[in-house]
Image (cartoon, helix red, strand yellow):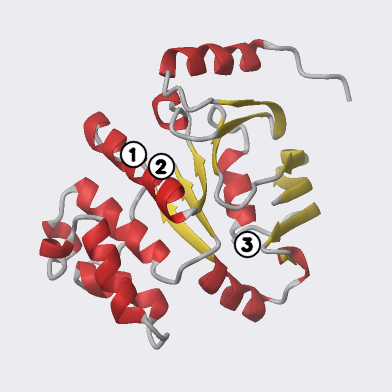
Amino acid sequence: MAEKVVKCFHQGPNVVRALDGVDLRVDPGEFIAIMGASGSGKSTLLHAAAGLTHIDGGHIRVDGQDLGAMKDAALTRFRRRHIGLVFQAFNLIPTLSAEDNIRLPAMGTDGLEARLEGLLDRLGIKERRAHRPDALSGGEQQRVAIARALVTEPDILLADEPTGSLDSVTGQSLCQLLRELCDEQSRTIVVVTHEPAVAMWADRVVVLRDGVDIARFATDGGHDPQALTRDYQKALAAERPAA
């Protein structure tokens, strides 16, 4: 997905490298968690992987396509078909029903009705399809957002702090859902989080610090947040390798 990716931001006379040569490969059907403190570059990496942020060096490849080599119109079409996006703030259109929010990115595509019904059933929101976002709980809104991201059957699902606006019980339910989507439908999923209780559901964890991928380790399916927390804190405490 990411090959030696560099992204710089200008802060007055200074140039800050939000991403400093990040490498990240994600295999089809794999569930990856990207962890790091605020300002580590994890959301920037996810936005770059979605083609929402132009990078200053390296390559972002999805399904074999180099996103940086694509013009804006082609990139928009590619993203709509191949990349599903889920954000912490849900980003649902308040005047549309749950069903219409889900339909929106796939309007006019073949098989939409069958996909829609399948997602409403799979995500447990069939009875809430006619409700607008303000009539839904936080967990229901996030499930609608996931359905909207999946309705185009994307190659990869990217989620930026998807549990950040949810209580812990609802957040864990959402993580279990993502794990099931990965296991049962071979969905490729990349989640950005700072919470070990979220990252423990992934197959692998990648840790960023100051825009550099400093560590990666397998969770081994153990769902042990204490062990993952120890690995994460050990990675953060290690000295940054000399350039």
How many numbered dots are placed on residues in this image?
A: 3
Query: Does 61 sit above or below residue 13?
Result: below
Q: How many angstroms separate mark 3 from mark 2 (CA)?
A: 24 Å
Q: Earlier in the sequence, mark 3 or mark 2?
A: 3
Give the camera-side residue of 176 and 160: 176
Picture quadrant of residue 226: top left
Q: Position of residue 93 (x, y in %)?
A: 29, 68
| Badge 3 amino acid | Gly
Contact check, label 1 and label 2, Cβ < 8 Å: yes
Give the camera-side residue of 40 and 118: 118
Task: Give the residue drawn at x 21%, y 52%.
Answer: 140
For the residue labelled by badge 3, is the local secondary structure a helix, a strand or a loop? Answer: loop
6 on left or right of 130: right
Q: Position of residue 25 (x, y in %)?
A: 70, 45
Task: Give the residue drawn at x 49%, y 42%.
Answer: 191
* Residue picked out by circle 1: 176
Task: Give the residue drawn at x 35%, y 76%.
Answer: 104
| Badge 1 amino acid | Gln
Q: How many angstroms separate mark 1 from mark 2 (CA)?
A: 5 Å
* Classed neighbour count for the residue bearing mark 1: other residues with Cα under 10 Å, few (<14), some (14–19), many (≥20): some
Identify the disc placed on residue 51.
Answer: 3
Quarter of the image for the C terminus: give it. Answer: top right
Mark whose residue sits in front, 1 or 3: 1
Q: Position of residue 85 (x, y in %)?
A: 46, 58
| Badge 2 amino acid | Arg
Q: How many angstroms separate mark 1 from mark 3 (CA)?
A: 27 Å
For the residue labelled by badge 2, is the local secondary structure a helix, a strand or a loop? Answer: helix
Res 19 visible: yes
14 on left or right of 141: right
Picture quadrant of residue 49: bottom right
Q: Earlier in the sequence, mark 1 or mark 3?
A: 3
Task: Give the residue drawn at x 35%, y 50%.
Answer: 89
